[in-house]
Image: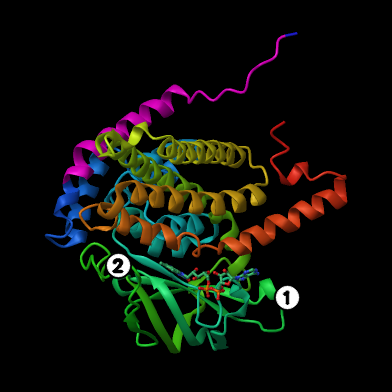
Amino acid sequence: MVYHMVDFELPNDVKELRANVAAFIDNVVLPAEPEVNTRPYMDIVRELQARARAEGLWCPFVPKEYGGMGLGHLGNAIVQIEVGRSFSMLGAWALNCMGPQDATMLTLIEHGTEEQKQKFLVPLVEGNLRICFSMTERAAGADATGMQTAAVKVGDRWILNGEKWFSSGASASDVALVMAKTNPNAPRHEQFTTFLVELPNPGYQILRDIPVWGEEFDPNFEGEQTMGHAEVRIEDLEVPEANIVGGLGMGFQMGQHRLGYGRLRHGMWSIAKAQAALDMATAWAIERETFGKPLADRQGINWMLSDCAEKLYITRLMVLHIAWKMEQGKDLRIENSMAKTYIANMLCEIIDTAIQIHGALGMTYDKPFAHWYTHARANRIVDGPDEVHRWTVGRSVIKAYQRDGTTASAAGGDLF
Ligand SMILES: Cc1cc2nc3c(=O)[nH]c(=O)nc-3n(C[C@H](O)[C@H](O)[C@H](O)COP(=O)(O)OP(=O)(O)OC[C@H]3O[C@@H](n4cnc5c(N)ncnc54)[C@H](O)[C@@H]3O)c2cc1C
């Protein structure tokens, strides 16, 4: 009997693709990064986008018929790990795969009407439209079903009233995807609808970009031009019926298919960042001497590096398995929640180790760690806080035991 091993070898075309993207990031994107604080960010983006398109590196996940590269989940994941090496996010912008642009393209492809595709999807894929996502309110975040913004139908229009906050990029966007309650009497997850709101709009008033930890030091890089996080008053905001995406009451159901994609992309970016932090920590451990020996000769430091390497290895296996499950169309909700939490914490811990090994130098802005850490820290809150995902996974563990007499199916048991 011949047993076939699980094959972790990437297909040749994926390897080739990775090499092409890596060369583009090394030769075109990374050399542009020092310009970030010297001239308008979106000017740099537009120049890089022209070069990326010329090389056929464009919207990796979007089907070819809509103007993208048409990659599957594995191919896209491998592209994203190279894109993630650009810390200023220029890589993601260059290939037009920055969130929430990319996830919105997927939503429109899947759920948009023909008119919405022409009006919003085509310019999004062309890179000519900025979009933001307005779901979170002061009243409701982790439990988004607590949203208070309400929409009432008047003739062929909907009138929205309420508030939003943390709408990333709203100040620089042409369109906002706004979620609002359209039917308070429906079951909880069917009460909300997503509206495409063209900006600027007198009914969508941006009150301020909320000052966020770590972002105050980079006015050009993360400021108004790119990703400020807006607080918004929604007052008698008129939206035509034709701008509803995916149908009435579909706000939550529609979002589910993009979650797997978004988390995989984020996971790959996190691997790239954690790898860079571990490389820098290791280089410093080899270079820096204390008490007559390099740090690298100390067992305590070796253990710290070992813990980081172990976490990166687990992360790589997790995202590969999730990419495979997505390609097979398998249910991956539990793995997705586990990976989301694990990877967000992994990145924080590895950056924290890099700071520790660098000593006081690690705390300075001469090194990038403080900036990286503040961004990485948000990953434990956005897209579902750790505790909510762990709550979901914990419930699945209990259900699996009650159903099967073992928790295996909620603990990666479909692997073997
Ligand atoms: C940098 C950044 C960018 C963002 N961008 C956007 C955006 O573009 N669009 C958008 O709509 N939103 C955005 N958000 C908002 C984000 O999605 C919410 O912050 C997130 O959903 C958490 O909601 P909350 O802040 O209201 O926390 P809450 O819901 O108030 O939760 C607070 C804390 O309570 C705990 N908790 C909550 N529920 C449970 C539970 N069931 N069991 C145990 N503990 C629990 C968790 O520790 C959680 O962190 C952004 C946030 C940040 C920080």
x then y, percent, for residue 11: 47, 24
Q: Residue visible at 21% across and 60% down?
A: 42
For the residues carrying marks 1 and 2, which lies nearer the camera in this image? 2
216 above or below 255? Answer: below
User: In the image shown, does 299 or 170 lie closer to the viewer?
Assistant: 299
Mark 2 sits on what residue? Answer: 215
25 above or below 122? Answer: above
Q: Image quadrant of residue 271?
A: top left
Kind of residue indicated by mark 1: Pro
The N terminus: image quadrant: top right
x then y, percent, for residue 253: 63, 63
Mark 1 sits on what residue? Answer: 187
Kind of residue indicated by mark 2: Glu
x then y, percent, for residue 286: 29, 33
Query: Label 1 CB, ligand 1: below 8 Å?
Result: no
Is residue 17 on the magenta stretch?
yes
Structural crowding at the residue carrying mark 2, measured as other residues with C-alpha within 10 Å and reported as few (<14), some (14–19) or many (≥20): some
**Is residue 3 at all visible to an observer of this figure?**
yes
The C terminus: image quadrant: top right
Q: Residue furthest front?
A: 291
Q: Residue visible at 35% across and 70% down?
A: 213
Q: Residue furthest top?
A: 1
Magenta region: which residues? 2-31
Question: Sequence order check: which comes first, mark 1 or mark 2?
Answer: 1
